[in-house]
Image: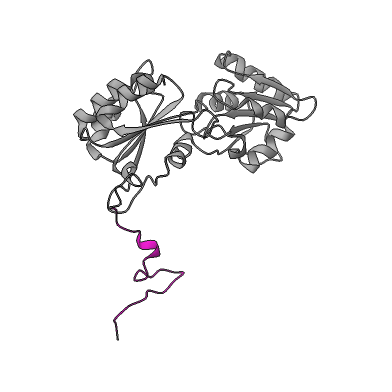
Amino acid sequence: MGTEQETSVYFIGAGPGALDLLTLRGQRIIRRADLILYADSLVNPEIARLAKPGCEVLGSAGMALDEIVGRMVAAARAGWIVARVHSGDPSVFGAIHEQMAALRAEGISYAVVPGVSSLFGAAAALGVELTVPQLCQTVIISRAEGRAQVPERERLRDLAAHRATMAIFLSVSLVEEVVAQLVAGGYPPSTPAAVVYRASWPEQQIIRGALAEIAKAAHDSGIARQALILVGEALSLGQGSERAASSQLYDPAFGHSCRAANRVGEG
């Protein structure tokens, strides 16, 4: 909504943690900003080093929605550029919907700058592809029900019936319940699973194991927040299991608009 020339507020995805995973567009806008309002409980504090002299830099962890919106509106009406910085990609569990609705109600222009999701930071840390031919072509992103309610039709037990690659956000404190729901829904207890804590940060920690074992392993490690749970057969690759088929994309017998098929043996 809006272009860089006319936009007042930018919702910027800072990536999973490492400062160099911030996009060039995000970095450019942050350097121009007059107010940086960042989720300081999740975003790398080094983001403040990008601020220009005189820029106001505020952490939002201790603020409620009304204060966050109030500061953005006041700054925008003063002609300031506002960088509202969220972790990962703000479109996934970024809590930006209510902020954008409030800005629209105040007539304030805004735009969203995508970022590298912690899901992709975690996949990179694990060294896996989440969608593997003939093994898994679907990724489900969800969360367990805790203080935040989940629609009945989206309960983990029901989603588990697909046995797709699943990425479960904001739920490591409920990891026992997550495992119970996934097994009850159809994942075998032996399904590969992982918990990735603070992907791409210096303190990144990875726990791998069978689904039935992952809850105890997470507890033994002391991980209770800021971690992603991943489950699915795609996680087995690179761990002594190379049974997946190759993609057709690079198969010499598979032609497409950029390459003719090599019909070996024809003619």
Front residue (pair 28, 175): 175
Between 256 and 120, the one lying in front of the other is 120
* Camera-side residue of 135 and 208: 208
Judge whether residue 155 can be spotted in this image: no
Task: Kindly identify the residue that appears in the image at 45 percent across and 36 percent down.
Answer: 122
Q: Residue at x 41, y 74 (%)?
A: 260
The total of numbered circles placed on residues is 0
The picture places residue 78, in percent across and down from the top left corner, at 75, 24
Outermost residue toward the right? 53
- Where's residue 74, x and y in %? 70, 20
Query: Farthest front residue?
Result: 240
Region in magenta: 244-266
* In magenta segment, residue 255: yes
| Image location (x, y in percent) of residue 119 | 44, 36
Specify whether residue 161 is painted magenta: no
Q: Quadrant of the N terminus?
A: top right
Q: What's the magenta bit mostly, secondary-structure-wise?
A: loop
- Left or right? Give the position of 51 relative to 159: right
Question: Can residue 67 be seen?
Answer: yes
Image location of residue 131, percent across then percent down: 36, 48
- Find residue 27 and report its image quarter: top right
| Colour convention of the picture | one colour
Q: Indicate the quadrant where residue 202 lies.
A: top right
Image quarter in which the C terminus is found: bottom left
Q: Which residue is drawn at 48% across and 34% down?
A: 118
Residue 120 vertical position relative to residue 204 in the rendered view, above or below: below
Q: For the view shown, which residue lies furthest in the bottom direction?
A: 267
